[in-house]
Image: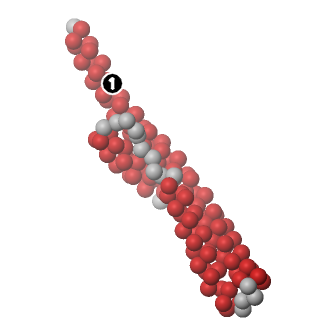
Amino acid sequence: MKHLTLLLFIGLAWGQTDLSIKKEAVLDAKGDAKKWLAYPPLALISAGGLGTATFFVGEDIFDMSDELAFLPSIFAGSFGAVISYNLFGETNKKGINGTSDSDNELYEEIYSKEFKKKKV
């Protein structure tokens, strides 16, 4: 009877670990998908702000013509959009630490499915 109870407890604990990994992956994916809702306004502000600032700096400080100041402002605006994308991409680098490779694979699989479902 003791051995049966022990086996039952181990089985329940093993299943609970699997369930908690699934739950953690779903919750992380939902949270990260919500964070990405802030990306478009932030990208627009950073790209527009850097582009406009670069244009005015080139035009006023360096006495460039409008045509010459326009090209660096395009690059600066693009840089602002790329940087904000990279900042948001770094927030998605989550995982579960201290577990086996199969648990990490399970987490990544569930996270990816849930994140794609919530992001679209």
Helix, strand or loop at label 1? It is: helix
Locate residue 22: give its quadrant: top left
Q: In this view, does 19 lie above or below 48?
A: above
* Residue 53 place in picture, x, y as percent: 71, 75
- Residue at left offset 50%, top offset 55%: 90
Locate residue 58: give its quadrant: bottom right
- Residue at left offset 31%, top offset 23%: 12
* Residue in the foreground of this view, choosing between 18 and 43: 43
Q: Can residue 106 be seen in this view?
A: no
Name the residue furthest right.
60
In-image side of 99 versus 71 (left or right): left
In-image side of 109 versus 92 (left or right): left
Identify which amino acid the numbered label 1 is placed on.
Answer: Ala
Quadrant the N terminus occupies: top left
Residue at the disc numbered 1: 13
Name the residue furthest front.
62
* Residue 63 place in picture, x, y as percent: 75, 88
Q: How is colour applied across the structure in the image?
A: secondary structure
Q: Judge the density around disc 1: few (<14), some (14-19), many (≥20) Cα neighbours within 10 Å.
A: few
Q: Is residue 31 visible?
A: yes
Say how many tags the image has: 1
Q: Is residue 92 above or below residue 103?
A: below
- Residue at left offset 39%, top offset 52%: 112
- Residue at left offset 33%, top offset 24%: 13
